[in-house]
Every structure is written in C-alpha cells, then in structure tokens.
Image (cartoon, rainbow, N blue to C red):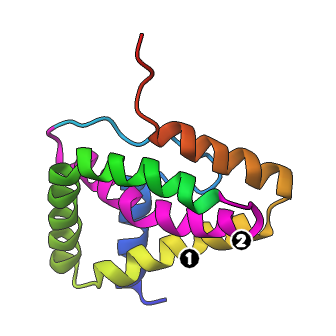
Amino acid sequence: MTSRIHFLVLAVFATCGGAALAAEEPAAVSDSPETAATLYGQSVSLPRQAAACSERIADYMPRFQKFYDAWRTENAAQIAVGDRFIHDQAKKGGVDADAGMAKLADADVERLRKTSTELLARHCQLMLESLAPPAAN
C-alpha cells in the first residue's frame, strides 16, 4: 500500500470510526463535515457488510434494504456533503478516495466473514436496529 493510500485509509478510518464489528448507530445529522463524512462512509460500508450478513443469514438483505433505503433518503443531503468532503480531502492528499473507501469496506467484510455465526448474527441485528426509524411513543 502506498503511503498516500495508507493516509487516506487512516483518514477515512478515523472519520468513519471503523465500525466493522461494532455496528455503531449511524451518525446523527449535524452540520460538521466530519459527521457528513461519517454518514458517507456508512453509506458505502453498510451495504457491503449487509451482503456479508446475507451470505449466512437467510432473508437478511430485504430487511436491511428496507431500513437502509429509508435511512439513506433521510440523510441524502448530508451523505452528499460527506462524499464531497472525503473526495476533496483525498484529492488534496493525492490519493484515490474510492480505492481507500473500498479497502476499508473490504476489511470490514473480511472480518465479518471470519467471525462466528453468533457474533455475525448479533452484528447484523445491531445494523438493522441502528438503521430503523425511532419507535413512535
């Protein structure tokens, strides 16, 4: 890995939090470019993690897609801001943002593929719960 790609991977990892097995709740909407970058990172990595979940969990992808589509629609403007922020930062550093994001997502997927079925199921359930809209009181 070149030092420039390594820089991007570290920057995006720090921005996105590297939540491969933590299934953190998607970031709350704010005006900061860092929060927007986190949302963008999640928009890239969550579908790939969901694909890994669906490899071992029957009917996972339709459940994920329903929540993800709603989450993505709700956060579309911030995701677009994050996309621009990540790509602008990568351009300044002379690196390929898309390649860096792909490397991060690949690493997340690889960890999920190597984990136990029990931990995978828990992670995948947490992803669904984190994307679900708040319950009406």
Tag of residue 36: none
Q: Are marks 2 and 1 in contact (CB under 8 Å)?
A: no
Circle nearer the viewer, 2 or 1: 2
In the displayed structure image, the side of residue 36 where residue 26 appears, left or right = right
- Going by the image, does 88 lie left or right of 63? left
Q: Position of residue 11 (x, y in %)?
A: 36, 63
In primary-sequence order, the first of circles 2 and 1 is 2
Q: Secondary structure at mark 2?
A: helix
| Residue neighbourhood size for the residue with mark 1, other residues' Cα within 10 Å, grouped as few (<14), some (14–19), many (≥20) | some
Residue 40 x, y percent position in the rendering? 30, 59
State which quadrant residue 84 falls in. bottom left
Write the residue at 18% across / 50% down.
Answer: 78
Q: 62 above or below 94?
A: above
Q: In which quadrant is the C terminus drawn?
A: top left
Dominant SS type (magenta): helix
Residue at the image point whose x is 74% and y is 60% from the top? 57
Q: In front here: 104 or 6?
A: 104
Q: Is residue 137 magenta?
A: no
Residue closest to the eye, 84 or 80: 80
Specify the amino acid type for callout 1.
Asp
The reply to whether residue 128 is visible in this rendering is: yes
Tell me the magenta residue range.
31-59
Q: Please name the residue that numbered disc 2 is placed on.
A: 55
The image shows residue 79 at horizontal and vertical percentages of 23, 56
The label on residue 106 is 1
Helix, strand or loop under label 1? helix
Kind of residue sitting beneath label 2: Glu
- Asked if the stretch drawn in magenta spans residue 52, the answer is yes
Indicate left or right for 76 with 107 as reference.
left
Residue 24 or residue 50, whichever sits in front: 50
| Relative height, residue 105 to residue 38 (above, below) | below
* Residue 18 visible in image: no
